[in-house]
Image: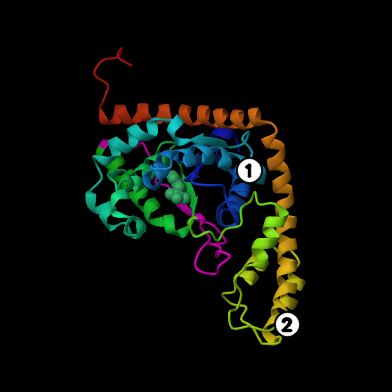
Amino acid sequence: MAADSKKRILTGVRPTGALHLGHYVGALHNWLELQDQYDCYFLIADYQALGDHFHEIDLIRDSVLQVTLDWLAVGLDPEKSAFVVQSYVPEHAELTMLLSFITPLGMLERNPTLKAEIGELPVERRTVGFFNYPMSQVADILLPRAHLVPVGDDQAPHIEMTREIARRFNRMFGEVFPEPETLIGRVPRLSGTDGQGKMSKSKGNVILLSDDEATVNKKVRGMFTDPNRVRADIPGRVEGNPVFEYHDAFNPDTAQVDDFKERYRKGTVGDVEVKVALAKALNDHLEPIRERRARYEQQMDLVEEAIMAGVRKGREIAEETMTMVRDAMRISTYTKSWN
Ligand code: TRP
């Protein structure tokens, strides 16, 4: 397919820390395949990160770089895909504002993901900007006129809202936006090392893509398993046990994994043996990623170039879309010469 006839993908992440195994199985692994078939825009959503981290701007700044390094390290290719830093393309802000005028308040009030997240925020951090972040995510997706959005299921309400806004805009002002489809990844989400819900930096239960071998070994040694199994000869539970969940996700030796499961259920294998094998599988998986990351850390000019090339491509399509939007809405089109 010619480059310009490929369907466009937009997806993104909030830069609030280095990426972890949960990001890998839930997103990056999938994106690696997509980048060969589609015209991909990968967004580092630093405006959106302000929503719950405006008190930690340094963290956001540093994380933009960490995320870029992680993306390069897993093999996302800036020659194939655009790495776009949201705040370098201020059209995101313009489109967010314009779309907010055709968006009923109820759409945000009813958004289940937003509701849950706001409920967890302390009152002093519940800002208008945070409340409006799904709106800005709608703009993220519509700005490159994306056809497909690969995300986890928690993001589905935002994509549904995007479809509604695209329809509404097109109906009111004329056809500008495709109605984007959601692409839900194969592996939904990975539990944290503590077995208490999903892997998430704020819970301190993550294994980072950039963790070194010793750190991975230590984190795996301390992983939550079946709490009732105080001795190796007690039959254990495999289901819901994060050690086995990770084996399933990362250990290519399925015969070994099946054997462990069988013996674990019977009480004929110790946690240590299972964990040592898991740590090895994870380290085997992470080693090439670490190596590539280290190489890029030595060549920060390449990292910067990746960002700038992505931003250029992001701005190009953003300007094109905004011209279409302003024309359709007949806003900032009073004279030909002002722009
Ligand atoms: N909300 C997403 C997250 O927290 C990040 C994101 C920002 C995004 N803009 C997007 C995802 C647009 C998909 C499309 O991970």
| Kind of residue indicated by mark 2 | Arg
- Classify 173 as above or below 204: above
- Residue at mark 2 to residue at mark 1: CA–CA distance: 41 Å
Q: Nearer the viewer, mark 2 or mark 1?
A: 2
Lateral position of residue 317 relative to residue 132, left or right: right
Residue 231 appears in the picture as rendered: yes
The stretch in magenta equals 173-201
Q: Position of residue 111 (x, y in %)?
A: 32, 56
Residue that numbered label 1 is attached to: 36
Q: Position of residue 232 (x, y in %)?
A: 70, 83
Question: Residue drawn at (49%, 35%), measured in percent from left and top?
Answer: 85
Q: Residue at x 49, y 60 (%)?
A: 203
Label 2, secondary structure: give it.
helix
User: Within 8 Å: ligand 1 and the Cβ of disc 2?
Assistant: no
Q: Residues within 10 Å of mark 1 (few under 14, many from 20)?
A: few
Q: Please, what is the three-letter code of the amino acid marked with disc 1?
A: Asp
Name the foreground residue: 196 vs 136. Answer: 196
Question: Residue 323, image x and y in percent?
Answer: 36, 26
Q: Position of residue 229 (x, y in %)?
A: 63, 83
Question: Would you say the magenta stretch is mainly helix, strand or loop?
Answer: loop
Are circles 2 and 1 on residues that touch, CB within 8 Å?
no
Answer above or below: position of 292 versus 213: above
**What residue sits 32% from the left and 49% below the top?**
125
Q: Is 210 included in the stretch rendered in magenta?
A: no
Which mark identifies residue 111? none
20 sits to left or right of 221: left
Q: Name the residue at 47% across, 38% down.
A: 58
> Which label's residue is closer to the chain start, 2 or 1?
1
SS of the residue at dot 1?
A: helix
Q: Which mark is residue 263?
A: 2
Q: Quick check: is the Cβ at mark 1 less than 8 Å away from ligand 1?
A: no
Q: Which quadrant would the C terminus be assigned to in this image?
A: top left
